[in-house]
Image (cartoon, rainbow, N blue to C red):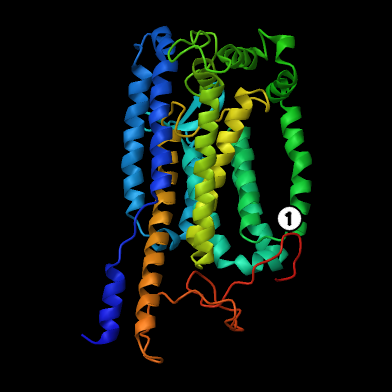
Amino acid sequence: MDAHARQATRLDAIQGRFDPWLLGLMVALAAFGVAMVGSSSIAVGEGLGVGPFHFVVRHAVFLALGVAMCLVVMRTELKTIERYPQALLIACAVLLLLVFVPGLGHTVNGARRWINLGVSNFQVVEAVKVIYLVWLASYLVRFRDEVNATWGAMFKPIGVAIVLVGLLLMQPDFGSATMLLAVTIGMLVLGGGHLKRMMLPVLAMLPALVALAVLEPYRFRRIVSFTNPWEDQLGAGYQLSNALMAIGRGEFSGVGFGASIQKLNYLPEAHTDFIFAVIGEELGFLGLFAVILLFSLLVGRALWVGLKCVEMRRHFAGYVAFGVALMVGLQALVSMGVNLGLLPTKGLTLPLISSGGSSVMMTCVAMGLLLRVSYELDRAQRQVARLRGEAVQLPAGDIPPTSQPLPPTPSAPVPPSSSVRGTSRLRQRVEPVFGSGRPV
C-alpha cells in the first residue's frame, strides 16, 4: 500500500462524536416533557374514561418510537440524504394530498390534517416540515450564489412554499402554513438571499395572509379574543383567559408539581397546546424561565453548529442545522406566545414537551438530523487537524492529496469558475452583505 492509500485509510478511520451539549439539552427537554404530560393529562384521561395514565403512556410510546427513528437518522450519512432532492419535494406534495383520499384521510373538528394508519392517526404536516427543510437546504447548496444574484433562483423556493401552503390551507391549517413560510424566509436569509429582492414577495403575501385570517369567521374570532380575552371569557376567550389565570396563579415558584387546578377540566388541551400554562401554574416563573432557557440554548447551539459547518464549506450540513433551529425555535416561540397571550391561538404544540404522536416522532427525527450534522462536523474537524499535523512534518511538496481539502486561507486566490455547483465545489464562496447585492 503506497503513502497516499495509507493516508486515505487513516482519514477514513477517524470517527466523530455527537455534540454533548445538543444531546444533553434534547434529553432534558424530553424528560421534562414526560413529567409534565404525566402531570397535566391525569384529569383529561379520567374525564374521557381511559385512565389517568393513558396519555403519558401513549406519549412515552411515541417518544420511544421517535428515539428509534432518531437513531436511524443519526447513523445515516448526510450525503445520502442530499442525493435525492426531487424525491423529497414530491414526498411533501404526496403527503399533503393523502389527507384528501377517501378512507385514508381522517377529519377532526372539521380539519382534514391526519391519515389513518390503523393503530393511530398521523398528522402529515409534521413530516412535511422536516422533509421540506432538508429539500430547501439542498436547494440552497445547489443554487446558493444564484439565490443572491437572480430573481428566478430566489422565487423558486418561495413558489414551492406557496404551493405547499395552499395545500395546507385546504385542510385547513393556518398555523402550520404560516410556520412553513417563516422557515422559508429565514433559511433564504441565512442562505445568502438578497434582502431587498425578498421584501417584494413578502410584502405581496402579507395582504393575502391578512385576508385569509380576517375573512374566515373562526380565525377572526381568535384574533379579536386574543386582544381582550376577558370580554368573552366563556366564549372565544375561554382558552386564553384560563391559560392566563393558570400562569398568574403560579406566581414566582408555582403551586407545586401536580397541584394545578386549571388542568382539572378548566383549561382545554392542557397536555398539548396549553401545557406551557400548566408549567407556569405548577412551577411558576422559575419553571417558565427554565423552559425558555433550555429552548434558547438548544436553538443557539444549533445555529452555532450550522455556522461552523458553513465556515468549513459543508454548506448542506450547515443549512440543515439552520433549518432545524428555525423550525424548533419558531414553533416553541409561537406556542409560548399563545399561552402568554402575546399571539392569537394556534394549534401548535411545544416541541419535545407537549403530548402528541406525529409531532413528537418527527421532532425526534429533526433532532437526529441535527445530531448527525454535529457528528460530521466533529469528524471533519478531526480530519483537518490530522492533515495539518502531518503537513507540518512532511517536506514541502510531499503533502499527500486528500478527499477533503483544507479550508482556504483568507489570502488564497479564488478560482474564477462559476459553473460548478454542489458541496464538492472547491472555490471559496463569495458571501453577500445583508441588504446589498455587492460581494464582500
Q: In percent of the image, x 57 and y 45: which residue is there?
A: 326
Q: Can residue 172 be seen in this view?
A: no
Q: Nearer the viewer, residue 262 or 147?
A: 262
Q: Which of 408 and 91 is in front in this view?
A: 408
Q: In this view, does 300 lie to the left or right of 181?
A: left
The quarter of the picture where the C terminus appears is bottom right
The quarter of the picture where the N terminus appears is bottom left
Circle 1 packing at 10 Å, graded few (<14), some (14-19), many (20+), is some
- Residue 241: horizontal and vertical position, in percent? 65, 13
In the displayed orientation, state which residue is furthest to the left: 1
- Residue 60: horizontal and vertical position, in percent? 34, 28
- Amino acid on which the number 1 mark rests in the picture: Met
In the rendered view, would you say 369 is above or below 284?
below
Please, what secondary structure does the residue beneath circle 1 have? helix
Residue holding disc 1: 198
Q: Quadrant of residue 198?
A: bottom right
- Residue 370: horizontal and vertical position, in percent? 44, 50
Q: In this view, does 413 lie to the left or right of 118?
A: right
In the rendered view, would you say 398 is above or below 232?
below
Q: Can residue 56 be seen in this view?
A: yes
In the rendered view, would you say 222 is above or below 235?
below
Q: Nearer the viewer, residue 357 or 187?
A: 187
